Image (cartoon, rainbow, N blue to C red):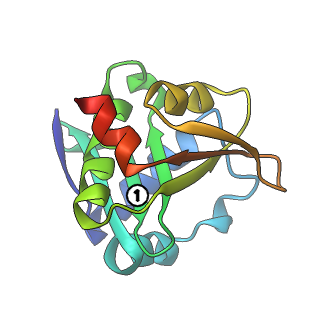
Amino acid sequence: MKFRIADLSDIAQMQVVRHLVKENTLSDPNLVPDKDVAYYITEKGKGWVAEIDGTIVGFSILDLQDKSVWALFVDPVHAEKGIGKELHRLMIEWYFSQTDDTIVLGTAPNTRAERFYALQGWKNLGSYSNGETKFELTFKDWTNRRA
């Protein structure tokens, strides 16, 4: 398995992974077009991919401008193998190398993703108006967790 920074040539495979997931699904796949993914990985922030034999099996995207996690998805066939945890570590390490500002994310309640973020040290702040669970991670909490 190989982890690396995402580039524009990865977007098609990233979209395949995004549409394979069973939780936090899109009601309409056209809601996240390739041009949006490109914008996030080249201008707003950065992305990472996990590859097995040249096939992307997971990815994460961080929005540095809005200080948020934009995406973290793993092909369900490859779930529970540490891929999500490593993608998370890579993006959060990079984020806190750029700034010590608190980062946020939203995810569907009562999902594996919600439990995953809690286990990674994120604090549950309640809900957004759309019903998603709101989480935050401070620089202090991240660095203390690793110590």
Residue ID at (41%, 76%)? 44
- Spot occupied by residue 61 in the image (x, y as percentages of width and height): 40, 58
Residue 25 at x, y percent in the picture: 67, 44
Q: Position of residue 126 (x, y in %)?
A: 75, 42
Nearest the viewer among 147 and 124 is 147
Residue occupying the point 57% across, 37% down = 123
Quadrant position of residue 10: bottom left
Q: Which element is circle 1 on?
A: strand
What is the number of callouts on the image? 1
Q: Is residue 58 visible?
A: no
Residue 77 locus on image (x, y percent): 43, 24
Q: Is residue 33 above or below residue 15?
A: below
Amino acid beneath label 1 = Ile
Q: Nearer the viewer, residue 110 or 121?
A: 121
Residue 13 versus residue 79 in the image, above or below: below
**Residue shown at the point (22%, 60%) measured from the top left:** 97
| Quarter that holds the C terminus | top left
The N terminus lies in quadrant: top left
Q: How many neighbours does mark 1 have within 10 angstroms: few (below 14), some (14-19), or many (20 or more)?
A: many
Q: Residue at x 48, y 24 (%)?
A: 119
Most extreme residue toward the top is 80
Residue 73, above or below 14: above
Q: Which residue is mark 1?
A: 61
Left or right: residue 88 versus residue 5 is right
